[in-house]
Amino acid sequence: MPEFEHLFPQNTASPEPYKYPRKVSSGEFNVPPRDDRVGHGQQLAQQTLAAAEAVKQHAEALPEVKRPKGVVLDFQSDPGFKLKLESLEALRSGIELRNSRIVDDVMHGTVFVPEGNVGIFVRKFEAYAKENTKPRKPGGKTKPKNKDFAESITAIRLAALESFWTDAGAFPSEADGPLWWEVWLREATNPHDVDDVFRERAAPAGIQVGPNMIRFPERRVLLARASVQQWMSFENLFDILAELRLAKPLAGEYVGLPPSDQGEFVQEARQRIGPPPANAPSVCHLDTGVNRGHPLIELALAEEHLLATTPGWSPTDQDGHGTEMAGLALYGDLTSLLESDGPVDLQHGLESVKVYRADQPHDPELYGAVTEQAASRIEIAAPQRSQRAFCLTVTADGRDEGLPSSWSACVDAMCAGLEDNERTAPCRLFFVAAGNVPWEGRHDYPNHNHVQGLQDPAQSWNAISVGAYTEHAIIQADGYDDWKPVAEPGRLSPASATSLIWANKSWPLKPDFVMEGGNNAIDPATGRADNVDDLMLLTTRVSPDGALLTTTGDTSAATALAARFGAMVWAHYPTLRPETIRGLLVHSARWTQPMLDEFPQVQRHSRLRCYGHGVPDLQRALRSMHNAATLVVEETLQPYEKVDSDVKTKDMHLHRLPWPTQVLEDLGEIDVRMRITLSYFIEPSPGRRGWTRKHRYQSHGLRFDVKRPLENDEDFHKRISKAARAEEEEIEAEKDDRRWDIGPQLRTKGSVHSDTWTGSAVELARCGVVAVYPVSGWWRERKHLECWGREARYSLIVTIKTPETDVYTSIADQIGIPAPVEIETQ
C-alpha cells in the first residue's frame, strides 16, 4: 500500500482562558477515631514542647555559632492512616516538610521548625482541643478546629537520624561501618553555599564527600562515605538535611557469548554501506565505550566523538557491551544486513561517552551527575548536532519501586532542558533500559519477571523506558535437541523486568514499550535457563582473536534498537522536538496477540506495566497511508498564572483539526479507530515529601480529551473542567469510557498519554475538536518558587484509521497540500 508523509497542520489551537470551577470538597479525610479530643490535643502540644525543650537544653551547652537553627520533629500517624501532609508546612514561618515515608504501615513526616516557631503547632493543637469552627449557616454543623490535621497525628517525637531515611529496607546499623550515602540537602536561604556548608562540617567528622552535586528544586544531592557514628558527630546536620539514601551499585551483568569468525561477511557488507551525512542524527551510547576499529562502526563514529567521563579512562571498550550495543543501534540485528545484498545508506551515526568500567572497581558515583557530565561532553564535542538519541544501558539496583531517585530525576531534568535548575540546556531524548531479571530466576518465567521491578533510572517520567519481548523461538544449532525456549513468540523476554510489583500504581506506566531482546532456553540437564545463540541478536564485537561478530540480548539490546528507531525518525523529520519523537514511537506501538491473550482487557493495567504500549512499528512512526492519516501538532501553552496572591490555571487549547468529516459520514456505521498521543516533558521535584498536592513530583500535568458526537463546545468545556477538578481534588473520576482501549483514568499516568478510540465513522465525524488542558503540579502548588509563569511545550499526535477508505487526501486538501506524495518503500 502506498505510504505518505505525516501531516502537520498549523494554527489548530484556539487558546482559551481556563479556570477550574469553585473548589469543592474532596470528601472526608480519613482519620482514626479520637474519643478524647481534649486529651489528644493536649498530648500533642506537650510532645511538641518537650521536643523543643530537649533541643534547647542541648543548645545551651554549645557556643552560639554552633547552636542548631531550629528543631526537627517526627510526626507519626496511626497504622493504616495518613498524615495531613500539607498542614505540616508553613513556609512563611520557615516551617518545612523535609520528607515523608511509610514504615510498617505508619506514615512519618519529618518537619523542620525554626527556633521559636514551635508555638505555631502548639496553638493549632490547643485550638483543636478547645475551639470549634464557625457554622457555614445559622444552625449548621461545627467541628473542632484543625480536626483533620490533629487527628491524623498519633505522636510527635524529636527526629533522629532514622527520620531522614527514605530508602528501601532497614536503616543501616553502626555495625555496618562506613557506607556510601546519597545526601539530600535542603537549599538554605542562600542556596549557593549549602553544599559548601555540608563539606565544611563533614571534614571534622572524617566524612568523605564525593566531588559531584545535583541540583533540584529546593534540594541538592551529594554522595558521602560515612558510618552511622560519624553522622552522629556531624555538627547541626539536621539544619540542612532533608533525606538520606544509600548510593547504588551498578548492575554489571553483561552478556558476551563466543562469536563465530564471520570476517568475510563483515567486509562484504561494509562495501555496500554508505556513511551517514555530516551532522546527521546520532545514537549516543552512555555505556562501557565503543571499539571504533570495527569495520561496521568506524564509518559512523568519528574519533572526536569517542569520549569518557573519567579522566585517565580510555574511551574504547574493554568490556564489549558498548560495542555490542553500537552495532544494534546502527544496523539492528546484523542477520538482516549480512543476509541481504543491496546497498545500505545510513541516515544516522554513532557517538559514545564511556560512563562505566567493570574491571576497575571504584567508589560509588552520583550517577545522575555522571550522566549530566556525559551529555555535556558530547554536546561540547559536537555542538553542530541537534538531534541526538541518548542510549543509557547502564542501570542500578531498582529498589525504589517506581519512586523517583536522584538518577531518574536527573534524567527527567536533562530531558526537560534544565541545567542547575534553570532552562538553559536543550531538551533531550533519552532511552533507558528497563533492567534485567537475574539468571537464577529466569527459569521461573514469567513469575519472576512479574516480581522483578524496573532498575534505576528506568522509572524516569520523561525518558523512554524500554523493556524486552521476543519473537525468537527456533533453535537449529546442533546439540540442543531437548532444549526448550523459555518464552513463546510475541511475549515478554525472559530477561525483562516489569513494574507490576510497584506498590504505588499512580506512578508512570513503565516500560513505555518493548523491543526485541532475545530469548533463553531451558537446559534439560539442570532445569535452568541459559543462552543459545539462535535465540539472540547478532551484533558487532572486536576481539583479540579477530572475531567481529557475537550475539547479545536482554533489555540493553532492546534499548539500543529503540534508540535506533528514534534516530531514524529524527533523520526523516529533523525539525521535530524530542518529545514529539517520543510521542511518535509510543503512538506507533501495538500489543501482539499473545500479549492481549496473556492480559485481556480487564487486566490492561497489568499489560501496561509489563509491556507498556506494546511493540513500536518504524514504518507507522515514519509514514501515513491512505486509510491511516497521522496529524502531528507541536504547541506551547502556559498552564498557570498568578492572580493577586494565588496561582491559578491559565490556558487550555481547543484544537480544531482538519477533519475528514464528509468521508467519515459517508462511511456511516462502519467501525473506525482514532489513536491520540499527548507527549510532554515535566520538570522534577524529587524530594520525598509525599508527592501529593503541593509536593507533587511533576511540575505540571497536561491531559487530552475529545469532543463527543452530541456535545457542543460549551458542554465539552464543562466536562473538561469536571475532569480536571477530579484530578485537582484527588477524588475518583468518572468510570472509564469503554470505547477507549485504556481509558481516561489509566492513560493519564506519567507524561506521555496514548489511547485508541473505536466507534462508528459517523460518530467520529462529529468529534473533530481535541482539548489539551492543564492539571496541577508543583509549578502551581509551590508558588514561592515563582515558576508559575513558565510555559509548557507539548506534542499532540492524532491518527484516523478506516478499514480501506482514503482519509488522507481529504485532510491534506484542507491543510493545503496539493497532492499526496507517495513514498517509495523497500
Image: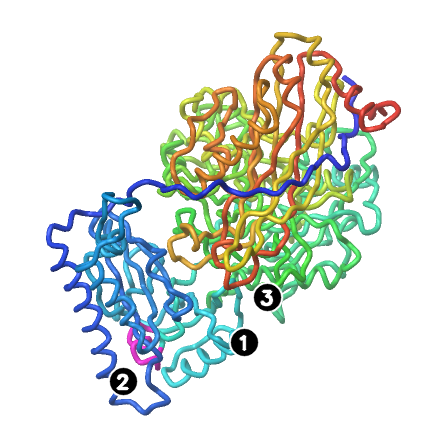
Whichever of labels 1 and 3 marks the residue nearer the N terminus, that label is 1
Disc on the earlier residue, 2 or 3? 2
Magenta segment: 227-236
Closer mark to the observer between disc 2 and disc 3: 2
* Residue 226, quarter of the rendered image: bottom left
Tag 2 secondary structure: helix
User: Quick check: can you spot residue 533?
Assistant: no
- Specify whether 521 is left or right of 49: right
At label 3, counting other C-alpha atoms closer than 10 Å, the crowd grade (few under 14, some 14-19, many 20 or more) is: some
Q: Secondary structure at mark 3?
A: loop
User: Could you tell me which residue is drawn at 33 percent across and 76 percent down?
Assistant: 70
Residue 223, percent from left and from top: 45, 69
Say which of 195 and 531 sits in front. Answer: 195
Q: What type is the residue that disc 1 sits on?
A: His
Which quadrant holds the N terminus?
Answer: top right
Most extreme residue toward the bottom, as rendered? 63
Task: Decide whether residue 232 is among the magenta residues.
Answer: yes
- The residue at which mark 3 appears reads as 420
Side of 770 relative to 9 (left or right):
left
Alpha carbon of mark 2 to alpha carbon of mark 3: how far?
35 Å
Q: Badges 1 and 3: C-beta atoms under 8 Å apart?
A: no
Spot occupied by residue 176 in the image (x, y as percentages of width and height): 29, 68
Amino acid of disc 3: Asp
The x and y percentages for residue 799 are 67, 26
How far from the left and from the top, in percent, is residue 257? 55, 43
What secondary structure is found at the residue carrying circle 1? loop
Q: What's the amino acid at mark 2?
A: Ala
In this rendering, is residue 286 above or below 325?
below
Can you see residue 573? yes
Q: Dot 1 corresponds to which residue?
A: 192
Q: Residue at x 23, y 48 (%)?
A: 142
Q: Which residue is mark 2?
A: 59
